[in-house]
Image: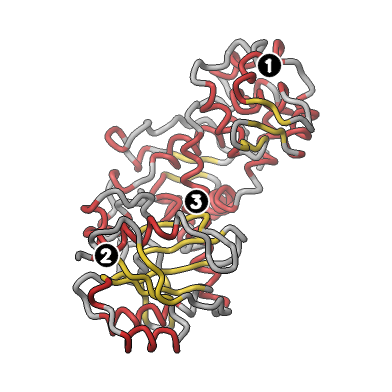
Amino acid sequence: MTEPAVVERVRSFLTSTSLPDGGSVLHLFTDAHHTLLEHGGLDPYQRITLEVGEDARHPDLVGRLDDGESLLAVEAKGTGDLLKGAAQAEMYQDGVQYSFLSAPADRISEPTVERLREKNIGLLAASANQESAEPLVWPRARQPWRDPYQSIRRQLDTGVRTQEWSTFTYNLPTHYLAWAIALEPGPLYNTAKLPNIIEPYEALPKRWKGALRGAETLGLLRIQGNGVRLTPTGAAVGDILDTSLAEWSSIHPKAIHSTLADVMPRAGAALRILLLQEPMVRLIVRGLKQADSSATMPQLVRACDALDHDRTPTLFFHPKRSAEILDDRGRVQWDRVEPIHYRSTTFYQMKSILKHAGILEDTGLGGSSVNEYNPSEDVWALRDVV
């Protein structure tokens, strides 16, 4: 059995099974190694680097449990050396609470099981005739070292949040903020009835569920099954906006030719409050301040990388291509970076909403895809208000 096939079965197991203590895996990333990319079906991908002293490794899978704190890492082996795999999994213990080795079931011996049990390393067996993996050893949670743990967590958190920014499918945040005006705090609204509730907002796109997901990413509401509930943050934003849906409809066309911050300053201020809570946004602001408030995309990425290397590659580079430009220690090899390596979620969706919030000057967007993107002409500049 190949290593990608083992990873596929382990992913299926981890995303559908509760751990012995009742927890479950909330987020799980596959390493962007070319063999795993070629296999396909292992999304989402993200290269995550664990540094310990002079050594560095990239686990095949890295995940976070639903307690929000505990991390896990998996080293998968197909035909590879299991002793080497066990040593790598042991190294992962420095950075995560749960470390696993996974391998084909027919390659696992009883001495291997006992060895991993003694070292508190989990063991997951994969079979060609099964779609999932079988746990042979469950590890106990252990306390990782602070610095490696924090590094992995920052990389993973940035991957999760940047992925969520893809929910901003519309350039204008008026579509997202509209829900803070339409919904009352308290009730759980039936999703099917939401179009009737928000009907006075005439600018709402036909694919309105995209606007709903963007509002959730901003923290304005929570989607719970077939229901939607306004959050306390959403209620506070509604109070700040202090307008009706009909009046909000008149704001939308004005913002198309300007920015929301200019058309309705208090709406821009509310949006800034939400966005500046994001570590990624604060990193961009710090990077631009380091560059005297204005920089092209390559200059901005270099400035941010000098400030926070853990977050920068994940924030700015495409998750499936990042391994092409990172060395074994996860450092950016700048001479290899090309337009195709940049993440469109950042240079398009994120830049657009930062502009409307009044965090960035309106210097134009670099294009909606990497096919038309020229990083050296993509200028990012802070507004005086930040």
Quadrant for the C terminus, please: top right
Badge 3 is on which residue? 160
Labelled pair 2, 1 in contact (Cβ < 8 Å) = no
Q: Is residue 314 above or below residue 81?
A: above
> Label 2 sits on what residue type?
Ser
Which mark sits nearer the N-terminus, 2 or 1?
2
Q: Position of residue 356 (x, y in %)?
A: 58, 30
Q: Secondary structure at mark 2?
A: loop
Badge 1 is on which residue? 197
Quadrant for the N terminus, please: bottom left
> Label 3 sits on what residue type?
Val
Task: Between residue 22 and residue 257, name the one nearer to us.
Answer: 22
Q: Residues within 10 Å of mark 1 (few under 14, many from 20)?
A: few
Q: Is residue 278 above or below residue 201?
A: below
Which mark sits nearer the N-terminus, 3 or 2?
2
Q: Position of residue 233 (x, y in %)?
A: 74, 39
Q: Secondary structure at mark 3?
A: helix
Which mark sits nearer the N-terminus, 1 or 3?
3
| Left or right: 140 as drawn, with respect to 299 | right
Q: CA distance from mark 1 to mark 3?
A: 31 Å
> Label 1 sits on what residue type?
Ile
Residue 249 in sight here: no
Q: Nearer the viewer, mark 1 or mark 3?
A: 1
Give the residue drawn at x 41%, y 81%: 91
Q: Is residue 306 above or below residue 354?
A: below
Q: Nearer the viewer, mark 3 or mark 2?
A: 2
Badge 2 is on which residue? 127
Q: Image quarter for residue 55?
A: bottom left
Q: Nearer the viewer, mark 2 or mark 1?
A: 2
Please state the total of marks drawn on the protein image.
3
